[in-house]
Amino acid sequence: MKNTLSLFDFSKKINYKNELLAGFTVAMTMIPESLSFAILAGLSPLTGLYAAFMMGLVTAIFGGRPGMVSGGAGATIVVLIALIQSHGIEYLFATVALAGILQMLVGIFKLGKFVRLIPQPVMYGFLNGLAIIIFMAQVEQFKITDSSGAVSWLQGMSLYIMAGLTVLTIAVVYFFPKITKAVPASLVAIIIVFAVVLGFDIPTKTVADIAHISGNLPSFHIPQIPFSLETLQIIFPYALIMAGVGLIESLLTLSMVDEITNTKGNTNKESVAQGLANITNGFFGGMGGCAMVAQTLVNLNAGSRARLSGIIASLLILIIILCGAPVIEKIPMAALVGVMMMVAISTFQWVSIRIVNKMPKSDIFVGVTVALITVILHNLALAVLIGVIISALVFAWDNAKRIRARKNVDENGVKHYEIYGPLFFGSVTAFTDKFDPMNDPEQVVIDFKESRIVDMSAIEALGKLSKRYKEQNKTLFLRHLSEDCRKILKNAEAIVEVNIQEDPTYKVMPEK
């Protein structure tokens, strides 16, 4: 019972007014984005709204990060467009459910912690790229599709009205918090622009111009596909990519919320919740999704810090699907475009530009590369993976250059090499070049007090070095090896022969 109650954090003080208003604002900004991505993928608008409802509700209740918002995100649906076009919507539902199972397994086996391996420059690149995508998606709303399907830019009075209302929205979002923060500025902006359009009967693009959003409750539905190995071979690669993209975006968003709120989320619990939400989508007709950075920022900026706003937003979307569509469909798109543009501006990490002259060139390259891949390919998983790989290679190169040796000969004629820096695949060449078996005395000691043996390349380098000294009838000793280094060498006895000097063991007073 206690664990069930802790899901809702009843022990923490909740600002119900902020949670209610934040939930309403999040719902208003989530609806057009879910509609847009569903239409982009060639799906029914309701498929996107069902995803927004189910992802938001399940993750708000069971997730590991209060204040974070999930929905029918574009990052996950974009990777499934090819599958939808080649095999149809039933395969989509099966893929979403399978992706959910994979995500749950990540959480169950506690693999969510590996998001810590993502460096800060990759985080900057991810957020900056996402900000650009969000902004450019709003620019697309200044286009119109005619009856023949041709797409063209708005012109004349229609363009001026759309632009004017968007600027009005941005102005309200920017200046209203300077007056009061009691009510979310985004919600006030939507209401003001809605009232202006209705009051003056201004002809402009509305939500209804994108799609009609009325419908029924989502119903249980087993995907109508052949349950065979061939089907699994078709959907598994897509499910794996979707699961990866969804988890990376969700856990990066979780890290972002941790920084903003100065609290700690649970990555494994969030992974399980994301998986459960996607399984629910697969069996109830949703397109699946993950955490949404833009809506999460809207939620946090509105003052939400608990789960309640996410639950309210999800239930409000369901109410709108069932009976509120006629009103919501009249909301001017310019109001939603303005709000999302301000979200994009706040998502962009301007600090990364201000400190660019203070950052290492490698970090700048990583950040720009991740942002470009995110913007051009819309593939968050690939962008982050490439960023992590480049960062890891740069780290390995830097550490390879740092290995050094201090040399001295003691009163007994024994030469000592004190090694500084890790010995691994990147540094073995520099390490080996520091020794002179031909001219060294009969006994040589390598001191690893300030170093450690890391991998197989290091073991092989020590083996070759020992062999070179043995050929000169000289003895090589290793000293001050850590316990894990000793274990590595013990396991490699079959391929390497080295002499380890026993280090003195110091007794300490036992704890009482």
Image (cartoon, rainbow, N blue to C red):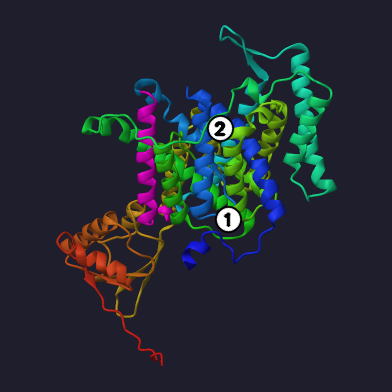
488 in the magenta segment: no
Magenta-drawn segment? 88-115
Residue occupying the point 61% across, 47% down: 312
Give yes or no for contact between labels 1 and 2 (Cβ–Cβ under 8 Å).
no
Front residue of 240 and 314: 314
Q: Position of residue 123 (x, y in %)?
A: 54, 45
SS at mark 1? helix
Left or right of residue 209, residue 242 in this image: left
The residue tagged 2 is 34
As drawn, the label of residue 258 is 1
Mark 1 surroundings: few (<14), some (14-19) or many (≥20) residues within 10 A:
some
Q: Position of residue 486 (x, y in %)?
A: 27, 69
Q: Position of residue 196 (x, y in %)?
A: 82, 28
Quadrant hosting residue 352: top right
**Residue type at the position of mark 2:** Ser
Front residue of 361 and 234: 234
